[in-house]
Each structure stands twice: as C-alpha cells, then as structure tokens.
Amino acid sequence: MLNAVIRLALTHRTLVLAACLVALVSGGYLSTAMPIDVFPDLDRPRVVILTECPGLSPEEIESLVTQPVETALLGASGVEAVRSQSSQGMNVVYVEFSWKTDVRYARQVVAERMAVVTLPPGIKPQMTPPASIMGQIMHVGISRRKGPRGGDLAAVGQTGLMAERTGGGTQYALALWRPGDRNRPEAWERVAFQNPNWDAGTPGRTATFLHGGRSHAATFRTPLEDRMDLRTTADWLVRPRLLRLPGVAEVIVMGGDKKQYQVLVDPAKLEEYKLSLQEVEAAIRANNLNASGGFIEEGQTERPVRVIGRLGPLPDKVVADLLKVVVKVNPDRAVLLGHVVTVEEGPAPKRGDSGIDGSPGV
C-alpha cells in the first residue's frame, strides 16, 4: 500500500504539488477564521447590578428591590439567566446573556429595563464595570510609614522636616529629621533642636521646640485620625490615579476609617426647643448647597451672583458653619443647630477591615 502511494506521488508530481498548495492556502485561511482561541473566554456576557439599601433587612430587600429588578430583567432580549443575592443593606443581581451577545448591547438592554423599575426612595442601582473572570485581581496595600526609630511621624510646618515621637504613656521622646530617600528612613539626616516641650493638656499630641533660632510646633495625629487620613488618601488620590491606567476595570478600597462629619443630636435639647429629628435633618440638607443669585448689571457687562452654601473643604470651618445653621425661627430668637447638637469628625460605621503585616492599612 505504501509503495503504491509513493509510486503515484512520483508519477503525478504536478498534481501532488498543486494539492499541497491548495491544502496549505485553505488551512491558513481557516486558521484565521476559527472561533477557537488558545485562551478562550470562559465567562459568557454578564451584567452585574449592585444596589446599596441602607437600613433594610434581607427580607425587605428581597421584596422591595430584588423582586422588581428580577421581574424587569426576566424576558429581556438575550437574557438566559438571572440570579440574585440579598444581604443586610446590599443586593447583587447577576444577569447572564447568550454567548453571542455583545457585552455593550447587554448593558444597554439592562439599562433600558432598569429605567422603568420603581424602587424605594433613595435607592439607586448601578452596573459594575465590565470585567471577565479571567481578569487578574491585584491586592495593593498602603500604610503609614514609621520613623527611623520606629516612632510616629509628623510634618513640621513648611520646613520640610519631620518630627518623630517615640515612647508612650506620659514619657515621650522627640527627634527631628531631614528626609532623604523615602524608602530608606534609616538614612535620614538627624537635625539638632533645642528646648523640646510637650503640651500638658494633651500628652504626646503637640510638641514645641527651637530650631534655627525660631520656634516650631509638630502636631501628631491620633491612631483614629491616622486611619481616616489614610482612607482619605486612598479614596481621593490613589484610586483615581489607578483608574486612569489602561486595563484597570475597577478599584475597590477596603479598610481604614472613612471620615465623616457626625451630627450628634441631644434628645433632651430637642424636647426643650420643641424640635423633631426630621427638622434637624431638613435644615442640614437645605444649608449644604450652592444657589444662583441672578446677575448684576455693571454698564455693558453682567456679573453672575452665586450664593455659596456648600460645606467644605476645611474641617474646622465645616464644624463651625454647621453649628450656625438655623433650624427653626421663633418670634424671640432663632434656634441654631449648635443649640441641640454637637458636631465632630468621626469614622463612618464599617463592616470588615484590612491590615498590612499586622498593622492597620488600606
């Protein structure tokens, strides 16, 4: 049999070469048009809807949020399966489409269906960024750096120097450094200073000293303030920069303490001034927005007038402005927010935390 094949190939050389050329061309074309990849996409088109429902129990979320969303999505074009998960204050709905559906078309279909869903006030579902299960998840942690002696660091005004606090209880030591390589604190230059003195009212909080013939002060943050500063840095500086990188679908921040201005209401004061909690909340909302005041004509020009009422960004000014908010106007005098509440910076309630090498981090 093999001899016959070899004899036939030698006898019809031209025909064999032509058949090989046709097979080579057709095989090359089919290899470019084959729908099979070396690394196939194992995740069919899917849209994830995330809904935060503060204060609602899983049973309430299931009846008020999950059921209306699932009802609106079932039967949509290309939808093959709808799954959901309801937990305390949170609802996640997974909408899976057929393999041939384009993910952008799938998100458009979901957006059109969600536009007609009626949900409780204040609840707004949102679609998560499109990402595949084949994507890589990278864990990045940030934490506060310790000084060369392992103590806490604080900036000394605009001098570029760093003060380091070591010790604890009522015995604190102060050191002054000129930072060099941020990644090698042990190589920082030691700076001499005179007359260190700690504030007796808040031990270990504020230190004053003399350097270069001038008086300087360094204020060290509390552990809670450190965690809030770290979370603020991650939310407002690190996360936006990571989202600008090509290929990054989503950045989720965990850990730390999210800073907020907490209005602590005194029930006895509310009763004394005949106020309700709803009136306090309405007053805060009404006094935290900017408004237009029209315009002023000056010759041939017009100058717009704005009423600046939005709080921020200086924390001390925010607290002072909140205390001056008018809650109720009486014939004798106006009741201010400071009469019935105390305002302070504090951490938002959190579920879960994170740490880096045994230390608090984000």
Image (cartoon, rainbow, N blue to C red):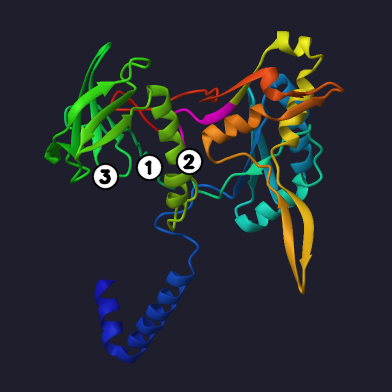
Residue 255 makes an appearance in the image: no
Q: Is label 1 in contact with label 2 (beta carbons under 8 Å)?
A: no
Q: Which residue is drawn at 37% across and 87% down?
A: 18
Which quadrant would residue 21 be assigned to in this image? bottom left
The one nearer the camera, 332 or 310, is 332
* Amino acid type shown at disc 1: Met
User: Residue 235, labelled with which disc?
Assistant: 2
Q: How crowded is mark 3: few (under 14 residues within 10 Å), some or many (20 or more)?
A: few
Counting residues from the N terminus, which is met first, the one under dot 1 or under dot 2? 1
Q: Give the range drawn in magenta.
A: 251-261
Give the residue pinned by disc 3: 160
Q: Is label 2 in contact with label 3 (beta carbons under 8 Å)?
A: no
Counting residues from the N terminus, which is met first, the one under dot 3 or under dot 1? 1
Q: How far apart are marks 1 and 2 (CA)?
A: 17 Å
The one nearer the camera, 242 or 49, is 242
Q: Residue at x 78, y 23 (%)?
A: 278
Q: How far apart are marks 3 and 1 (CA)?
A: 33 Å
